[in-house]
Amino acid sequence: MLTFFISHVTLNIMFGEFNLIEKYFVGRQSRRKDVLLAAGDDCALLKVPEGMSLAVSTDTLVAGTHFLKEANPAWVAHKALAANISDLAAMGATPAWVSLALTLPKPNESWLAPFCNSFFKLADYFDIHLIGGDTTKGPLSLTLTVQGFVDAEKALRRDGARVGDWIYVTGELGDSQAGLDVILNKELRNKPFAEQLEQAHYLSTPRVLAGQALLGIASSAIDISDGLAADLKHILRCSDVGAHLELSELPVSSQLIQFIGSVDKAQQYALTSGEEYELCFTVPEQYKGAIDAALAHCGCQVSCIGQIRPKGQFLLSNKGQPLDWPQQGFDHFQ
């Protein structure tokens, strides 16, 4: 039986799991009106608004794979929740609820306190209510399930791109990969902007407002978690089309260029960097002129980087000159 939903297989070294839950997770938020019953029973009871569909996404982060065990717990919390919120943003959904399954080697209050402070800060910013979860003893990992609302007829999907549509991305790309380089290689910490890039790897900004603004305008969308080239290919496969990317249009930050020392290398990072959590989306020609106005209030840069082509094509160019660059993104099993 669960009580937070609380498992009895658990963290009862030093102090019990019930105390752990009560101290760090219960009573931290004001209850949303659509949460009829949250933590404290076998299940949460939730109310979906009339005329809306439920959008659901689950993601797992494992110490040693998605973050180092010694990583700042506040950054880990932000990364975990932001990654899930980004999935909702990619469909134009409005976030509402989250559940959290947390596995810890032992109940470490010096880790839990900053983790929870960061988690609830981001959750409250997006008006997301923690409705339950589980705690278990074991290797450090966390699994989140976020839920939100969207009109199913308008939801942004991967299968709507058509030949002639324009390809866009939000934000700047490549910083997350550079930040990971810093995390994995301490010798890079003396390079320009190393600290800022490391933070960028953990502290992404989910593009919820942008996703909502694209409803009725974008023909397809995806969030960039495994790298632009890899994630765009998901759209191409689902939509049965190809693409041409103009890499000189890829948005890269000045700090990335200075860190790497080359615009070309920065563009390569932008093409393959995973865990960016920006949006890649396609827009029909008839709506291309509406993009800047639609996203003006979203607080993020938007760049047109290419165009949808017939199936079988995946072309890269730089100022019109063909390129043959590696396109491999992040693979969870490599």
Image (cartoon, grey):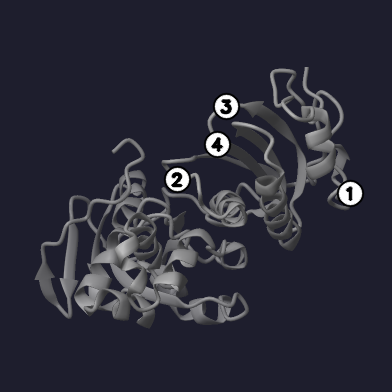
Inspect this view and state whether residue 323 appears: yes
Q: Which of marks 2 and 3 is in front?
A: 3
Find residue 211 and report its image quarter: bottom right
Residues at discs 3 and 1 in contact (Cβ within 8 Å): no
- The kind of residue on which mark 3 rests is Gly
Q: Distance between the residues labelled 3 and 1?
A: 35 Å
- The kind of residue on which mark 1 rests is Lys
Extreme front residue here? 14
Q: Which of marks 3 and 1 is in front?
A: 3
Residues at discs 3 and 4 in contact (Cβ within 8 Å): yes
Counting other residues with Cα less than 10 Å from the Cα at mark 3, is it few (<14), some (14-19), or many (20 or more)? few
State left or right for residue 152 relative to residue 178.
Answer: right
In this rendering, the answer to whether 4 lies above or below 61 is above
Q: How far apart are marks 2 and 3 (CA)?
A: 17 Å
Residue 196: percent from left, percent from top: 46, 72
Q: In which quarter of the image is the N terminus?
A: top right
- The kind of residue on which mark 2 rests is His
Q: Name the residue under label 2.
A: 66
Q: How far apart are marks 1 and 4 (CA)?
A: 31 Å
Counting other residues with Cα less than 10 Å from the Cα at mark 4, is it few (<14), some (14-19), or many (20 or more)? many
Look at the numbered disc 3 and give the secondary structure of its residue.
loop
Q: Which residue is drawn at 78% across and 35% down?
A: 20
Q: Which of marks 1 and 2 is in front?
A: 2
In this rendering, the answer to whether 153 lies above or below 292 is above
Q: Mark 1 points at which residue?
A: 33
Q: Mark 4 points at which residue?
A: 141
Look at the numbered disc 1 and give the secondary structure of its residue.
loop
Look at the numbered disc 2 and give the secondary structure of its residue.
loop
Q: Distance between the residues labelled 1 and 2?
A: 34 Å
Viewer-nearest residue: 221 or 143: 143
State left or right for residue 80 relative to residue 130.
Answer: left
Viewer-nearest residue: 192 or 202: 192
